[in-house]
Amino acid sequence: MNWYFVYVAAAILGIGAVSAMPASAQDSNIPFHEVANVIVNATKTPSATVSITLQSTSINDMMIDPELVGRVAQDDRIAYIALTNEGACVPGVGDESCILVSILRSGEWSTIDDVQSGAKIIGDSYIDELNGAFDTSAEFHSVYIRYDSEARLSQASDRVIVSTVYTMPREDTASMFEKIGGIILSPDIRSGGGFYDVARYILAAHDARMLFSMTPNAGTPLMQMRIAAEFEIADPHSIDPIALFSADSIERSAMFSRGANPLGSIIQVAVISSDKLGLASSESEILPTRIIDGDHVPLQLNTPGWIFESASGKLIKAKYIFGTKDKIEGGDISFTLRAAEAAQMPAEPVPTFSVPAEILVIILAVIIGAGAAAWFLMRRA
């Protein structure tokens, strides 16, 4: 089976959305977030793509050389930097691991030769530091110009992205996860369990791939490590996220004290279907929400349950928040879908058109923050 990375529009799961949340529910001293994503594709042969993302803007969590992080943060030419063992990281690359230095195309590059030489100069200025940071020996392979819509999904910009690609022999995902995780992830993250352990379950059960990325985000790079896999499923209308992650239960990281920072751990699900679907039943509570600046916000962050941003149609979107829970067992958060006309829809949220004084707007950290790279996921070639 051949695999390749594709960009998926951030709108699928509301990635990078800015949401209004009560300040009392947040712990601003914890920049670390853990995110579990499920995309169920019910349009053809039913399949699920699952991923675990560990992310932070702090070098105390992601232990990258501060000078390198500072350079990326201040370099407005950089769209993102990525390390992946996905064989076909760009067209023309075979079964190799890649480091990509992806650049926003300069308006001064008028010809293809200008683009290739300019991008290579920028990439070459980073590759030695990146090889040192990752303990790798990647060498220049090519410059890839993204001409279609994928070129603009990772930035709030209409500028084309050009990737300078460096390759090396492909490393097994489990080995790469241990190596890069041991270098980059802080001891607190590695010993804290939580979604870090779920990533190991995915590695044990599926042919997974790994991605580490740095994306400039308001002057502070958002750093992420992600494990992802795709596999066929029997019933795309019966959604049990814990089972799809090959886990018996999911715990929050010990990085979070009991009940603190309820948005620090998020499970997101999207179901894509050719037919209109709706919610039939849910084992977990469906939280009432209100709309603040276009976002679905739960009335109570301390209550565990699902937030359905789209409960009917050809795209179902939902987020699960743990509330005061630190652990959920298999089956606890499963839900089922059926044809829309026979489904039971959650109550409509109460529209709110202005943010109350007691509410602060925060970044709902999912996959990649606002203005950062769109979620990479694996699909069949």
Image (spheres, rainbow, N blue to C red):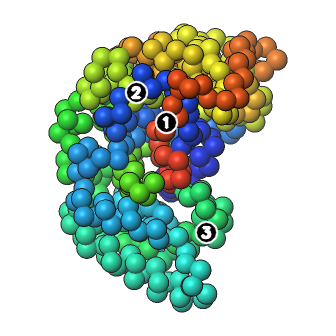
Q: Label 2 sits on what residue type?
A: Gln
Q: Position of residue 178 (x, y in %)?
A: 22, 46
Quick check: can you spot residue 233? no
Identify the residue at the far right of this view.
341
As drawn, 343 above or below 167: above
Residue at x 54%, y 89% (from the top left corner)? 113
Quick check: can you spot residue 147? yes
Point out the tag, 2 or 1, that comes first from the N-terminus.
2
As drawn, 230 above or below 263: below
Q: Quadrant of the C terminus?
A: bottom right
Can you identify the residue that label 1 sits on?
362
> Is residue 355 found left or right of 138 in the rendered image?
right
Q: Element at badge 2? A: loop
Can you identify the residue that label 2 sits on?
26
Q: Nearer the viewer, mark 2 or mark 3?
A: 2
> Is residue 35 found left or right of 150 in the rendered image?
left
* Badge 1 density bin: few <14, some 14–19, many ≥20, Cα 10 Å: some
Q: Position of residue 357 (x, y in %)?
A: 56, 26
Can you identify the residue that label 3 sits on?
159
Point out the tag, 1 or 3, that comes first from the N-terminus.
3
| Quadrant in the rendering for residue 24 | top left
Q: Nearer the viewer, residue 174 or 215?
A: 215
| Quadrant in the rendering for residue 290 | top right
Q: CA distance from mark 2 to mark 1?
A: 9 Å
Q: Label 3 sits on what residue type?
A: Arg
Point out the tag, 2 or 3, that comes first from the N-terminus.
2
Q: Label 1 sits on what residue type?
A: Ile
Q: Position of residue 213 (x, y in %)?
A: 39, 55
| Discs 2, 1 touching: Cβ within 8 Å | yes
Residue at x 63%, y 43% (from the top left corner)? 11
As drawn, 325 above or below 207: above
Q: Element at badge 3? A: loop
